[in-house]
Image (cartoon, helix red, strand yellow):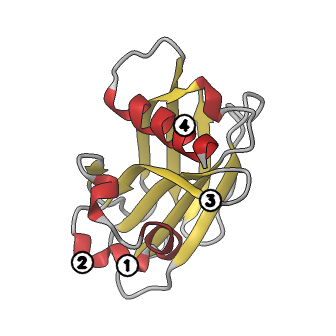
Amino acid sequence: MMKSLAAALLLSTTLTLPTAALAKSVTFTTTLNRYGGNGAYLAFYVTDANGNYEGSLWMAGGNSRYYHHLGGWYQATGGNPGEINGITGASVGSGRSLSVTFDLADALFDAGYQLHIDAAAEDMRESPSDVVVPLTSQGSGQATRGRRYVSSFSYSM
């Protein structure tokens, strides 16, 4: 339990400090497929090596009444809007890209943590864990295909 608490504190601290001594500046780039619908909601969150939720990084889509469609994130957080307070942006249109930069704790890399991206679009199927990638130093710059909405995802440090 103490390890999870420490990891959660590291994760939340990196979201509030513009420059942390033990943090990497990491840019997430997500490009959506052309699916012919309205903008997609995306939830970016981290789990530990055992699949336990550690924290939310970003929510693309500002209307909280649709968050329950982001099934993995919603289940992990109980739909608690406090998990995303202040870390939201607009939904992402079909065929469009989103780039977001964070200062993430070094301790999240090469330690079994995974980044999940849940995706959902209005009147279309939901896609929990559309992308799941381990947070590793070697994964930087490597493109990953999503299961439904995400055409490609990569992160760079």
Viewer-nearest of discs 1 and 4 = 4
Amino acid type for the residue under numbered disc 3: Asn
Which tag is nearer the camera, tag 3 or tag 2? 3
The residue to which callout 2 is attached is 65
Read off the residue under disc 1: 68
Task: Locate residue 102 relative to residue 142 in the image: left or right.
Answer: left
Q: Amino acid at mark 4?
A: Ala
The quadrant the C terminus occupies is top right
Residues under labels 3 and 2: Cα distance? Answer: 24 Å
Q: Which comes sooner in the sequence, label 3 or label 1?
A: 3
Question: For mark 4, what is the residue?
Answer: 6
Front disc: 3 or 1:
3
Quadrant in which residue 145 is drawn: bottom right
Comparing 96 with 90, the one in front is: 90
Q: Residue furthest top?
A: 21
- From the viewer's perspective, is the residue at label 4 or at label 2 nearer? 4
From the top left corner, tell me how far across and down residue 52 is, in percent: 62, 59
Q: Is residue 37 visible?
A: no
Q: Which residue is mark 3?
A: 52
Q: Earlier in the sequence, mark 3 or mark 2?
A: 3
Disc 1 from disc 4: Cα separation:
28 Å
Marks 3, 4: nearer the viewer: 4
For label 1, count other residues whose C-alpha is less than 10 Å away and answer few (under 14), some (14-19) or many (20+). some
Q: Are marks 2 and 1 in contact (CB under 8 Å)?
A: yes
Does residue 9 appear to the left or right of 123 in the view shown? Answer: right
Tell me the number on the disc at residue 87.
none
